[in-house]
Image (cartoon, grey):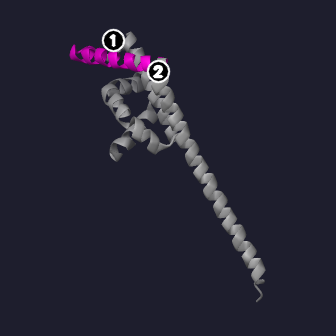
Amino acid sequence: MDWGSVPQWVTALIAGGALTAAWASIRSQKELARKRAAIDFFGKTEMDRETLNAHESFIEAIGVLDEHFHKHKTLDEFVKTKAYWDIRGYLNLHELMAVGINQRVFDDNVCYDFWASELENAYKKTRPLIEYIQKHNDEEDMYCELVVVNNRWMKRG
């Protein structure tokens, strides 16, 4: 049985090495692109005046929500307030980030290092409202990505 000559095997090994190098290069470029996308996203969240205002409104709205719960009012009443929409607007930012992570657009490690405590705090403070939205507004998929990322990150930390 003739399996070929040495030059043919050398050529095959070189081609295999080139394929491996190309695969490793593509993989590292994808990883770098995900990290850059995450940094760009968070750079925007930290520098954009509208986003900073949305965060401030969110913090104020959390106070309104807490007060609402202490007065034993229902979420049916709370959804009619401006604070409800301020919370939703900021949760939408978290959901967008979570979609980016779950779709592998953003690097999970970069996002975790920068945003894990922010997401965890937002989720803890709004969990009853998130569950209400998912049950009552025909939006059962709303904030699902946020919940998935938060739960995964809580196990990590």
Q: In the image, residue 31 lies at what x, y percent?
A: 55, 48
Report the front residue among 151 and 9: 9
What range of the chain is rendered magenta?
50-73
- Residue 31 located within the stretch drawn in magenta: no
Q: Is residue 116 left or right of residue 6?
A: left
Task: Kindly tell me whether residue 103 is visible in this rendering.
Answer: no
Of all residues, the one furthest to the bottom in this rendering is: 1
Q: Which mark is residue 138?
A: none
Q: Amino acid at mark 1?
A: Glu
Relative to 137, is 122 on the left or the right? Answer: left
Disc 2 packing (10 Å; few <14; some 14–19; many ≥20): some
- Quadrant in which the C terminus appears: top left
- The residue at 73%/73% (across/down) is 12
Q: Which residue is mark 2?
A: 51
Give SS at disc 2: helix
Tell me the residue at 25%/15% (across/down): 67
Determine the residue positioned at 55% across, 42% down: 34
Q: What is the spatial separation of the Cα atoms under label 1 and label 2, in whole angstroms? A: 26 Å
Q: Which residue is mark 1?
A: 77
Residue in the foreground of this view, choosing between 93 and 78: 93
**Horizontal and vertical percent for residue 135?**
40, 25
**Relative to residue 67, is residue 108 depicted above or below?**
below
